[in-house]
Amino acid sequence: MSLLDRITSRLNISETKRKIFRNLYWAVMGKTVSLFGSLFVGILVARYLGPEQYGLMNYVISYVALFQIFASFGMDNIEIREMSRQDADTDVILGTAFRIKLVLALITMALVIGTAIIFESDHFTVVMIALYSVSIILNRFTVIRNYFTSIVWNEYIVKTEISRTIIGAAIKIALLLIKAPLWAFIAATTFDFALLSAGYVMAYRTKIGSMSLWRYDSTIAKYLLKQSFPMLLTSAAVLIYQRIDQVMIGKLLDNTSVGIFSVAVRLVEIVVFIPTIMSQTITPILVRIKERDEQRYHIKSQMFMNVTLWLCIIISILLSLCSSLVIYCTFGKQYSESVPILRVLAFKASAVALSYTAGQMIIIEKLQKYAVIRDVFGCIVCVLLNYFLLPIYGVIAASYVAIIANLAAGYFADIFIPKYRHIFTCQCRAILLGWKDLRKLLVMIK
């Protein structure tokens, strides 16, 4: 009997809950391997490149990331929602979404390179941005990932991502051994997307069937675009206040400051993956529950928010307290300036948990057309505060701004949106009483 089977056999739960637990296990396993694998290699690369070159590398990645959302058009969660339905024609949804995303990716790549040529004075930076922008094209096969998520088959996604992590790590370690230049590491990071796409395609062909069955439907295309447009605006605003800080640090300060800040961000991402993975795993289940029983849906969604938030709060506190030890044991003394940044930024994970779980409820309840208000608000807060505070207080200001912007968008804005008042109430309950559900879960597992 496998470890997973032994764990699930000890839990006195229904088959549906057992399936959720198995899926969550695979999701956490995959993300854990991916995060710690990339973190391990990232530490080696950061030590090798130093704060300035590592900062430039992260500036390039953040610059391209600002445009990535236009290539996906905010459709990922909409795809998962639609393919989770029992009567969904998945071949049509997959074929239509893939074609839309491919066309948008080509347009976005041209936009990235064009803006870099206009606004970047350094020729090497422009070339690096153009090189990494290829990842926009390679990332279109996420439609397959969304399909496996919708049918709660995270096992196959995980195996693909673990393989990508291992191969990608081996390539970067080889580059370290031969003392490769910066551009080689950016090229290797771009190649990671090719590995991931190839893995998704292989998993789909092996477990599901031929991709030749995918069909494009103009009616479905219009529906997906219409449903996704509010999410495009929302996702664009979210991406801006999640990524613009590193770009603004590079513009208003220097690449070394970007490197110092990026180290703290990399460590916080380990905690931020918790609400992301739990949401991706639980959302398809909540969609089905809502279709059958509205009252039960509200109970389960509240429980989902409670557990996710308080799990992140506890881990955020631990990471903040151990920030000095974590930085020195991983990235080394040359990144000592990252310690005070990590001490503050650790609590971003809790703000993200509160915002992200509410965001999943918004999608499930088809209220996403109002979401743009909350996220544009967060975007404005982020840009304005960084613009005025970075030149005065330095890179530490970006840590406080990151938390404030996430709370502004994902919590405080809900007060002013009538359709989101019930979600705001759920968030308040989660903050005040959510620890009780986490305690119940821990007791049940024990």
Image (cartoon, rainbow, N blue to C red):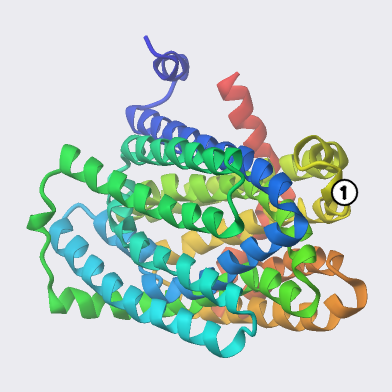
Residue lying furthest right: 392
Image position, residue 306 (x, y; %):
62, 47
Whole-percent x, y for residue 65 in the image = 52, 68
Q: Quadrant of residue 140?
A: bottom left
User: Picture coordinates of residue 220 (x, y %)?
Assistant: 18, 73
| Camera-side residue of 82 and 66 | 66
The relative height of residue 82 versus residue 201 in the rendered view (above or below) is below
In the displayed orientation, state which residue is furthest to the top. Answer: 1
| Circle 1 crowding by C-alpha within 10 Å: few under 14, some 14–19, many from 20 | some
The answer to whether 365 is drawn above or below residue 432 in the figure is below
* Quadrant occupied by the N terminus: top left
Outermost residue, front side: 178
Relative horizontal placement of residue 220, taking residue 367 as reference (left or right) = left
Please tell me which residue lies in front, 185 or 204.
185
Residue shown at the point (56%, 37%) measured from the top left: 37
Left or right of 291? Residue 131 is right
**Which percent across, then down, holds residue 267?**
70, 46
